[in-house]
Image (cartoon, rainbow, N blue to C red):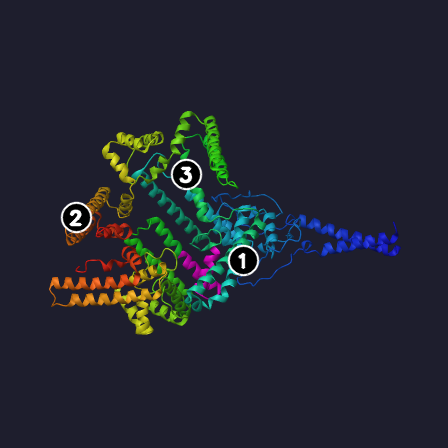
Amino acid sequence: MKLSTIVFCSVLLNALLLGLLCNPGFKQRSPVVRLNQITNRQVRVVAPLIKQTDSPAVREITQAFQWSQLESEDYRVYTANLRKLGCPEPTVRDIVIADVNELFYRRVYDMVASLQNRFWELVADQKQFQKLVDDKWKELEGLNAERTVMLQELLGKFERSSKRQEAVDLESREASRQLTDFLDPEKAVEYLKCEQRFAAARDKLNSSQPPIPQNELQGKLKNLQEQMDLELAQLLSPGELAECRLRKSSFADLRNRLTGFQATGEELRELARIDTSAAKLSERRDRIKEFLGPERFAQFERAQTPHYQEIFEVAERFEVPNEAVGDAFEMRKAAEEKAVELRANKSITPEARINGLKEIQMETTRALTSALGPEAFGAYRSRSGQWLDGLRAEH
Amino acid sequence: MKLVLAVSLVLNVALAAVVGHNWQKQSHAVEKPVAIAPIIQIRNEYRPGSTVIEPGIVTNHFHWKMIESSNYENYVRNLRAVGCPEKTVHDIILAEIQKTYAVKCAAVPLAVTFWSCGPERHAAGRHRDEKQREIKAEAQALLRQLIGVDFIGESEDGSDDLIKNAFFRFFVGPLPEPVFEQVNLALEKIISSTSEMQDRSKGILLPSERQSLLDMREQCLASVRQQLSSAQYDEFTRRFAAARLLDHELNDFHVSAGELRAIAGIYAGIFGVSLDVLESFDNHDKEQTAAQKEIFDKRLHEFLGAARFADYQRENDLDFKNVKALTEQQSLAPEIALKIYEIKSLFDSQCRLLHQDVALSPSELSDQLRQTQDSTRSAIEQLLGGKTFGLYLSQHGGGWLTNDLRQ
């Protein structure tokens, strides 16, 4: 090799090493994109990564620890510093999410600032305003997407869920616990895992792209169900399996909506058995009626009627006795029947019909006020009492 | 050439050493010995999920465990002791308490067997709600004690928090950031309280709850007023009144920017501050009394003048809205709706005059009313055409053409 080639290589290596040293990733501070600072907090940015392999420049702590030593104008450095310090991941997330949110609220401020002084001019022209709202909506959706990317870069892939969603998830976990409270804890866990696994498989089949033809899909879903039944039969005893099926039946859901209906646990279980075993609706009805007896069957049916539930909800808030709720429900039924009869009666004059309907309405109003009390009736009237106005309608 | 090579090689080695040193420094950052900041002694009070450093441990490395404590107060104190900015302390504590108490709330069991229904299940549900409210109150008290904040705002789905922030900023107007934050907090708080009350009452408010909501609203407004100058508060009340007016009274009536601001001022002066624009307030905002409405109409009449006030009244007339919707739906000329409105106004005044005429016997009154109604019906049928007229009678408020007028 010629000497000149070796010299050239060496000089090139020098240049490369110098370049590496000048690289921002090698400095303690990353390049900073300045934003307008509008709070007393440090403005942070996520500087674009030069190479995916670059590690963030973590600050060295060499004196009595102060929070400021963790701070950096680059979110990646800040996050890495927190982690290096042993800050638990959930706390890192809490800190970073709140901080990033604030950064984006400042972006919202920048977006809205120019419009704030034009409030009157903008809202007075509703069509233009609607267009502006639509445009800004899109911009905000864009900001949100940007925020999600930033958070994912900093915190890894994670679901950003609202408190409401978290509460729903927690409640659903509690519901699962109740569902399986008759099983050994280990079995319960296994059962729920199995359920979730098959639910996910069902979802996957249902949402597969391109969609599976209906017949084929039904076949696959049936196979899946059989497979699940097999697994559950291995996991649970026959008694446990039967109880699980009853608890997952549609009747089990109904128990939440049986307003004012009283029944023992054994009665409800029996009702669920009838419900799941009866092939036809009429058979189901007959068997339930036979089991409950005519009076309780009427109560059972009434409890599921929206008209009864509407009165019950108001009465419950105003502490009106249950008997009055039943009375009010019967009053409505009677009034509506009377009105239908009167409208169908062709032997009376239109004037008599109008007066008769008016009388039914007034009488029903009086009776309901007396049964529920004026306050509860007032609440019921404004919430669900439109049918009272309908009583006067001639058709 | 050899000299150049020698110098270059020396430089290679030196630069490689510096690069190597920097590389090592970065991969070991934070792990170098550090002096420990004064940390408050840990007490054994329960803070879920915290890792507690054992007393007496000797280390010259700083670790998060030194800040952590099983006691929230100590945790906050430790964070402050190391100079953690107050806002970050808030963020950490607020998020942690939110999560901890959300888990506590969700874990409150429905104290009833799976196979239960009706009153038994209902009572258990109420009991659980009550317990969950107690837990929330406990969380709020703890927050107040720790960081002086007693409100846990709702974190929103997707971009909803950004949208809400933009919306508030636009409505509240240009304010210094700390002032905006306080006003924002007051508004968030009233929205949250209202929504909680609605959830709890399932939309059926007891008189005491209605009153309590009105009181909370007054507190919210007092707190907003405290933050703003009188000019800013005046602007605030006008902007919220405008939102209400554009949603209701001025929905179909065009006004200029200046007029809108003036009308909003009139409205706020008579009805007070309207927070209708904030969700869930529609049902229990201060009820407008007939006297207040009369004053508002009078002031508006003065402001707009007779002709434009008549237009305003027409645009707010339910019958006109109905017929306008029908003509739009049937692609008829807009003038037809105006014409029908005029006919209806004339008809109403004729009926009034007939009813006031004491010289008419009941049967004469009945006959004359029926004649007026018949002729009006024919005129409208002609304007709309048979098919549309049928729709008007059955679905668009045309009942006045067939109703018994003697009532």
The amino acid marked with disc number 2 is: Lys
| Image height of A300 relative to A166, above or below | above
The residue beneath circle 2 is A346
Q: Residue at x 12, y 66 (%)?
A: B360
- Label 1: few (<14), some (14–19) or many (≥20) C-alpha neighbours in 10 Å: many
- Badge 3 sits on which subunit? A
Q: Is residue B7 left or right of residue A249?
A: right
- Identity of the residue drawn at 23% across and 60% down: B401
A328 lies above or below B7? above
Q: Which mark is residue A356?
A: none
Q: Which class describes the residues within 10 Å of circle 3: few (<14), some (14-19), or many (20+)?
A: some
Question: Considering depth in this image, is B297 or A93 the residue closer to the camera?
Answer: B297
Mark 2 Cα-neighbour bin, 10 Å: few <14, some 14–19, many ≥20: few
Residue at disc 1, secondary structure: helix
Q: Which residue is mark 3?
A: A175
Mark closer to the chain start, 2 or 3: 3
What segment is highlighted magenta in the picture?
Answer: B161-189
| Label 1: chain letter | A
> Residue A329: image x %, image y %?
23, 44
Disc marking residue A103: 1
Label 2 chain ID: A
In this view of the protein, can residue A110 be seen by the observer? yes
Q: Position of residue B404 (x, y in %)?
A: 19, 58
User: Is residue B164 in the magenta section?
Assistant: yes
Q: Nearer the viewer, mark 2 or mark 1?
A: 2
- Relative to residue A237, is residue B219 depicted above or below? below
Kindly report the distance in space between the C-alpha atoms of the residues bearing marks 2 and 1. Answer: 74 Å
**Residue A163 falls within the magenta-colored stretch:** no
- Judged left or right of residue A91, residue A358 is left
The Cα–Cα distance between marks 2 and 3, rounded to whole angstroms, is: 56 Å
Q: Is residue B181 visible?
A: no
Disc 3 vs disc 1: Cβ atoms closer than 8 Å? no
